[in-house]
Image (spheres, rainbow, N blue to C red):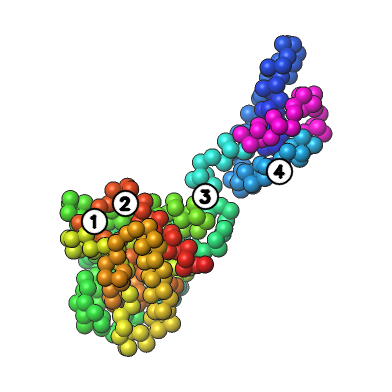
Amino acid sequence: MTRIRQAAVIAGALILTITQTGCMQNMRIGSQQVVTGNQAAVSTSAVSREAAASTVENAPKTESAASAGTSSNAETTPAAQTVSNAETISAAAAAAGTAASPAAEEVTSETISWNPGWEYAAFSKINSGTATLYHAKPTGARGKVVCINAGHGTKGGGDVKTQCHPDGTPKVTGGTTEAGATEAVAVSSGTTMKDGTPEAVVTLKLALVVKDKLLNAGFDVLMIRESEDVQLDNIARTVIANNNADCHIALHYDSTDWDKGVFYFSVPGNESYRSMEPVASHWKEHNALGDAVMTGMQAVGLKLFEGGSMEMDLTQTSYSTVPSIDLEVGDTASDYSDATLNVLADGLVLGLDKFFS
Ligand SMILES: [Zn+2]
């Protein structure tokens, strides 16, 4: 902080030295100060991003603090005496702006590796991959971690089967796997958009847009997949979210071809399913999350499919211990231009805002 302020004042002082004096000695002092300033600037960007972030917050307050602090510094005292407060402020603001300008630099991240000791971990068959937890700045601004799970994208996931329910009971609805089955593919390959693009490519594109918007909104974000492939099956993705996030949003496109609109898969109104743990303890919050997200989607003008929900017995929901939905943002005929993905992401952030407020 102090070094940043000094650098800012020095920068301001330099401008004045050059513009107000033709004296060689002063010019030389100016040059030395530039070096000092540059060194300070370099170390500032290498130092913690937290320092940069607090500088931004404090920038408006540097008016008197910067001047007072600088006048005690022997090296910059002569120059500082010629700098008016107003100029110091703008120089400080410019320096702070430069140090903190790329939003991405304000974000820190950590790798989340698989922990076989987590509840339900033993049901996963593919879990050699890792997820990444991104922290918004300032850390925990919202105090909530949102897990964004770009649907599909696990090579070999269709050749492996996992148990549909932790208690071994059969599925109560159809879907990718028929009702009555006790096992389903660990991760399916997903559908294909009308133009031939795999669903997994589009869900990833959307996930990356959502990630940035959530971080900007102050949420921490747990990203399950940020490239073409991650070796985490649906149970692994769910268990990772359970242990590292406050909610879990899986992004998908449905396999129909008439641009049906946005909806989420709600928890089936089936007594035996709703009485099975962990569904029994969490199904209400899954549906509440879905309803909040649909409110956000409507608020940004998106079309909902049949009120925004369809009952489905999913592996994800069957193992979720945090509010969790499979969000179908459209189908194979839906537009997925950058503009549309932006609107979808805005709707999702609005919905999460509502859910957590
Ligand atoms: Zn899907």
The residue tagged 4 is: 61
Q: Are marks 3 and 1 in contact (CB under 8 Å)?
A: no
Classify mark 4 as within 8 Å of ligand 1 or not, answering yes or no. no
Q: Which residue is pictured at 46% across the width and 56% down the height?
A: 214
Q: Amino acid at mark 4?
A: Lys
Report how far apart the C-alphas of labels 3 and 4 lie in the structure.
24 Å
Classify mark 3 as within 8 Å of ligand 1 or not, answering yes or no. no
Q: Earlier in the sequence, mark 4 or mark 1?
A: 4
Q: Are marks 1 and 2 in contact (CB under 8 Å)?
A: yes
Q: Point out which mark residue 340 bears.
A: 2
Q: Is residue 40 above or below residue 301?
A: above
Report how far apart the C-alphas of labels 3 and 2 lie in the structure.
25 Å
The residue tagged 1 is: 334
| Numbered disc in front, either 3 or 1 | 1
Q: Which residue is pictured at 68% across the width and 27% down the height?
A: 12
Crowd tier of the residue under label 3, counting other residues whose Cα lies within 10 Å: few below 14, some 14–19, many 20 or above: some
Report how far apart the C-alphas of labels 4 and 2 lie in the structure.
40 Å
Q: Earlier in the sequence, mark 1 or mark 2?
A: 1
Q: Quadrant of residue 250?
A: bottom left
Q: Quadrant of residue 89?
A: top right
Crowd tier of the residue under label 2, counting other residues whose Cα lies within 10 Å: few below 14, some 14–19, many 20 or above: some
The residue tagged 3 is: 107
Q: Is residue 260 above or below residue 287?
A: above
Q: Amino acid at mark 1?
A: Ser
* Rendering coords of residue 196 (x, y %): 17, 51
Badge 4 element: helix
Q: Amino acid at mark 3?
A: Val
Main secondary-structure element of the magenta-colored stretch: helix
Q: Which residue is pictured at 37% across the width and 57% down the height?
A: 300
Q: Earlier in the sequence, mark 3 or mark 1?
A: 3
Report how far apart the C-alphas of labels 3 and 1 lie in the structure.
32 Å
